[in-house]
Structures are given as structure tokens and as C-alpha cells.
Image (spheres, rainbow, N blue to C red):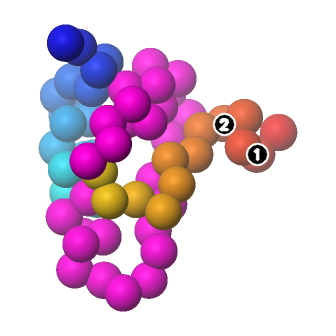
Amino acid sequence: MSFNVHAPDDDIVLDAHDFNLKNDFPLDFITFDEDFYGGVSKIDDFQFNKVKGKYDYL
């Protein structure tokens, strides 16, 4: 199954996920890349407060 998360985006989202696991405050993951947003928002195992895209800011 493809989530449209590819290099180097896969490193970015995994680093953000790992960083969030080490903190006590909620972290949102924000991207304006629509394919990347669609892929990341489908992965339930990531520990983000919310995955946000450009439409959250229009």
C-alpha cells in the first residue's frame, strides 16, 4: 500500500513522530504538499495531535 510518503518526506515525518513521542505537549504536523498530507493523515499509528494541510489555513 502506498501512502504517497516518499524520500525525503519519509525521514521528515518519522523524525517529527519520534520528536513528538519525547515531549509532553501536543504537536501538529503541518504540510502544504497535498499528496504528503493525504498520505500522512491516513497513517493512524503516528502520534500527532493533528495533521494539518493548507486548507486548515484558508
Residue 36 seen in this snapshot: no
Question: Horizontal and vertical percent for residue 42?
Answer: 39, 31
Badge number at residue 57: 1
Q: Which amino acid is tagged 2? A: Lys
Side of 30 relative to 19 (left or right):
right
Badge 1, how many Cα within 10 Å: few under 14, some, many 20+? few
Disc 1 on helix, strand or loop?
Answer: helix
How far, Cα to Cα, is label 1 from label 2?
6 Å
Q: Are marks 1 and 2 in contact (CB under 8 Å)?
A: yes
| Residue bounds of the magenta highlight | 17-45
Q: In the picture shown, does residue 11 fall above or below 35?
A: below
Q: Residue at the spot x=32%, y=59% of the render? A: 47
Q: Residue at the spot x=17%, y=44% of the render? A: 11
Q: Nearer the viewer, residue 13 or 41?
A: 41
Q: Quadrant of the N terminus?
A: top left
Disc 2 on helix, strand or loop?
Answer: helix
Side of 7 relative to 12 (left or right):
left
Q: Residue at the spot x=20%, y=57% of the render? A: 15
Q: Quadrant of the C terminus?
A: top right
Badge number at residue 54: 2
Q: Is residue 19 magenta?
A: yes
Q: Residue at the spot x=36%, y=87% of the render? A: 24
Question: Horizontal and vertical percent for residue 28?
Answer: 50, 60
